[in-house]
Amino acid sequence: MRHTLSILVENRFGELARIVGLFGARGYNIESLTVAETLDPQHSCVTLVTSGDDRTIEQIVKQVNKLVRVLHVADLTSHAHFERELVLINVKTETSAAMQTVLSLVSRRHLHVAEVMEDGLIIEATGEWKQINALVKELMPFGIRHIVRTGTVAVWKNPTAEVMEMAGMTKAMFCKDQA
Amino acid sequence: MPVNTAEEPAQSGQESTQEPMRGARILLEALLREGVDTIFGYPGGAVLHIYDELARIGPRLRHVLARHEQGAIHMAEGYSKATGKTGVVLVTSGPGATNTITGIANAYMDSTPLVVITGQVPRKMIGTDAFQEVDTIGITRPCTKYNYMVRDVRELAGIVHEAFYLAASGRPGPVLVDIPKDVTAEECLFQDSCELHLPGYHPPAKARQEEVERILERVLAAERPVFYVGGGIVHSGATDELMALAEALQLPVTPTLMGLGCFPAAHPLSLGMLGMHGTYWANMAMTEADLILAIGVRFDDRVTGALEKFAPRAEIVHVDVDASSLGKNVPTHWMIEGDAKAVMQQLLDALTAGGSRPSRQRLDNWWRRIESWKAYAPLSYQRSSEVIKPQQLCEELDRITGGEAIMATDVGQHQMWLAQYYGFRRPRQLLTSGGLGAMGYGFPAALGAQMALPEQQVIAFVGDGGFQMTAQELATAVQYGTNTKIVVMNNNSLGMVRQWQEIFYDRNYSHVDMEWTPDFIKLAEAYGATGLRARHPGELTEVLERGLSTPGVVVMEILVEQEENVYPMIPPGAGINEMVLSPSHARNVPAGDPGSEP
């Protein structure tokens, strides 16, 4: 089963390599991975999508937690959360008819055309992993020239106080109150 | 991380009034502050500044010059395993660092606290494939508890402090500090104190009280309990608590290889070692147990055998300081994250508070069953008047040393026989390469232990194969005037591999015969040590007694039966109750195998 992990880690040189290396060394799968700083620049948030049975996921969480600079690991799949992925799709539209069909699909699906080229469009879409898969499948017949997905990012709906603290949220909210 | 926040090193603590020192000196001062008295090392280009300072610092810091970096790190491991202190290694960049990898991986597997300091090429040359440059941090990342590259001399003292804390706390392990050469030449003030910055690292101590009470209830309610203990008991210094708890509850105790000595082998509650070459009765007890109290162990494959057949009737209570060991290999009913000593003290307190004094009688049937397994298949071997049996050698070593020596081994047959036939009575008495199973470990580990404990009898018990992997450390042993004794169990073959080829590859012996080995007596003499040899059973006692009482370094080569196998044995893929017993047992087999439950 697919699991989305949210990992808070100290923002230091080489720490991402430890997380990725652990997955490689122990034979765990990484389906997608995104990393960026949190509001607290000393910490980064990694959203990592992996798969495995319950015991494997439990072991993954424990192994990641064991890393010295990892502050917090949560399997978001077992918490209320919200997931999104961004995709950029370069679709070939050699005829104006094809262009029209794709554009109508874009409008029907409330997608965004990032750039119009002579013979194609760059479509920007966000959605859940499954929605992106469905969109890709739908655009496939037109001819996708290039596609890049960011991988899933996920946000807690009800983060614990601990998570908020580590992600710099407490400080941010404090600043807002001051304002 | 995508962004490297170049933090200003914390300027905590009072600035001292001293003059600035160069990084090399700061490193040594930081080591002294951690209580280091001995460094095992080997110099080279990237650590020249450090060695320059070492020569100036005087006798406060002893440096032991090994003959190979692998020797140095195994010495540091032996030093640490025998004393509980953190072992320190200092080597140069490139090959100096890579030669320590076996020892680092070994220490990682066996939870030995080490701080390994490696030189690195100057910062501006990193990434240019410079002379003796290797990505030490990258190579050692998967086999260290943590590793550091020192990018600024002002961080150095703090990193050293953190490295020692990480190495020794929680589940201990090796921590590596990689220092570019130019950092050791830069100057700054040596701070009197530095703070730890480890917001994500919280080694557990006590378990939750309600958990303790629940598991105690379960243990007291069990009819067929087994107490399975290992290296974690040794690391947390919990031998007394283990004894008190085992005696109070009258539990059968079975230690792992890494746990040998944490509970005296001769104690009536001891079942001896369990696992692949453990005792029949320990493995049968695990198989039929209704409750396994596992503390400071990790359910290694050498202990469990085939997982699907492991302890099918047992409720498993597992206490470990490393949460990732809990439930990793076997489904576990009670996973308790905690320090072995603290949790056992809690159990003892809860037992006292409960007021009940559990009687041994409650486990009478269980103990009778264990005794019947023991009577059915005791450890046994066929003696010979023609040739020395390796088991006999181990028994003789036990007898002559009174079971009091610190014994260091490699991996293989000799290791298993020693584990079976030497009556370890206290923790830190057996130094052995358990998890990694590294040949060449035993002799330098013995040497490191001897450096720490010069008054104690320390014996490297090694095979002819393993000894040849690090025999060059004879020079170190003699140079430093040690009394290290080396017993080479020579069967002229790589015995454990030969045993597997005999049993599982139809005697298709492939490259296991040492067709040429050096004359070990001459080898010893060439290094300035004493060499002795026993060829026949009649010579064994005399050679061991003479060798062990001769001052200085002595190599005792004992020629033993070549085709002797280690029994009992769990074949690969079998359950631990499916042991192959020794042929000498088969000859005397009494009717009625008590192995299976009626």
Image (tube, coloured by chain):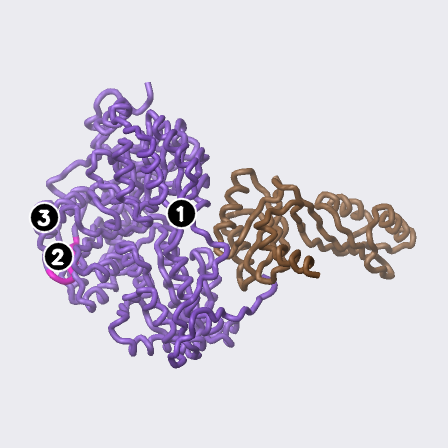
Chain colours: A brown, B purple
| Residue sitting at x 41%, y 60% | B175
Mark 1 = which residue?
A: B205
Mark 3 closeness class: few <14, some 14–19, many ≥20 residues within 10 Å = some
Q: Is residue B292 left or right of residue A7?
A: left
Mark 2 = which residue?
A: B532
Residue range (magenta): B551-557
Quadrant of the image occupied by residue B313? top left
Q: Amino acid at mark 3?
A: Thr
Mark 1 closeness class: few <14, some 14–19, many ≥20 residues within 10 Å = some
| Chain ID, mark 2 | B
Residue B553 within the magenta-colored segment of the rendering: yes
Q: Nearer the viewer, mark 3 or mark 1?
A: 1
| Chain ID, mark 1 | B
* Res B525 seen here: yes
Q: Establish if B229 lies above or below B466.
A: above
Quadrant of the image occupied by residue B66? bottom left
Q: Position of residue B215 (x, y in %)?
A: 39, 33
Tag 1 secondary structure: loop
